[in-house]
Image (tube, rainbow, N blue to C red):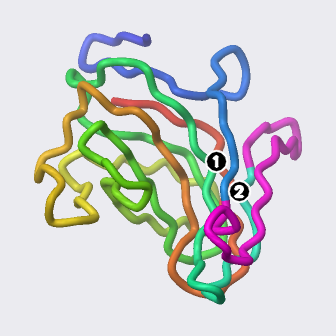
Amino acid sequence: MLFSTTSFSMIIDNLDDIRADWRSISDQVMGGISEVNFNLVKENEKKFYRLEGNVSTKNNGGFIQSVARIQDDLSEYNGIRLTVRGTEDEYFIWIRTPACRFPWDRYIVSFKPDQNWTSIEIPFNDFKKSNFYIRNKMNTGNIETLAIAAYGKDFSAQVDIAHLEFY
């Protein structure tokens, strides 16, 4: 954890000494045809992850994602801070808690990167539940996974992530 006199944060992944265990998933797990790549990239001495692929809604598909397991109580934090750039499409952060019983259940928020590196802060209160039967307020003390996703339309996705932390 990093502490300052005004706030504190917990780094999820800084691509150096703190690394999340990411795994990539596409709609191919359910018969879709979207293709996903998630790689560590180094460009001009800067390291970052690149989530990219062709998202296709054919065969009832339409998503690619990279998922990290979270094992910490985050109830003392207010949201997620990430440094991103990418195509100017809508991307998503998906969070799952034990309230998310089915694979399609999650808490969702969207963001739109631009072509330059930008730091984005997203409060937990901005996340919306995906289905009516999930609790309205996300239990941040029991987050199981966090995913960066491209979803819902046919497009060539590319989003770069250089830093990810809870604040």
The percent coordinates of residue 71 (x first, y second) are: 43, 20
Span of residues in magenta: 26-49
* Label at residue 133: none
Q: Between residues 92 and 161, which one lies in front from this camera angle? A: 92
Quarter residue 134 falls in: bottom left
In front here: 109 or 141? Answer: 141
Q: In which quadrant is the C terminus drawn?
A: top left
Task: Answer above or below: position of 132 versus 44.
Answer: below
In the visual, does 16 lie left or right of 138? right
Hey, what amino acid is under mark 2?
Leu
Residue at (27, 20) in percent of width and height = 7
Task: State the residue in front, 111 or 37.
Answer: 37
In space, the residues marked 2 and 1 are separated at their CA atoms by 8 Å
Give coordinates of residue 32: x percent, y percent.
67, 76
Quadrant hosting residue 139: top left
SS state under label 1: strand
User: Mark 1 belongs to which amino acid?
Assistant: Ile
Q: Name the secondary structure under disc 2.
A: strand
Q: Is residue 15 above or below residue 8?
A: below
Image position, residue 104 (x, y; %) = 41, 61
Task: Name which of mark 2 and mark 1 comes first in the sequence.
Answer: 2
Instruction: Please identify the quarter of the rendering in which residue 103 is found.
Output: bottom left
Residue 67 lies within the magenta run: no
Q: Is residue 47 above or below residue 147?
A: above
Q: Say whether residue 105 is left or right of residue 159.
A: left
Which residue does the numbered mark 1 point to in the structure image? 161
The answer to whether residue 44 is magenta is yes
Could you tell me if the residues under marks 2 and 1 are in contact, i.e. CB atoms within 8 Å?
A: yes
Report the disc number at residue 51. Answer: 2
| Residue farthest to the left, as pictured | 136
Say which residue appears at 43% left-offset and 51% top-offset. Answer: 120
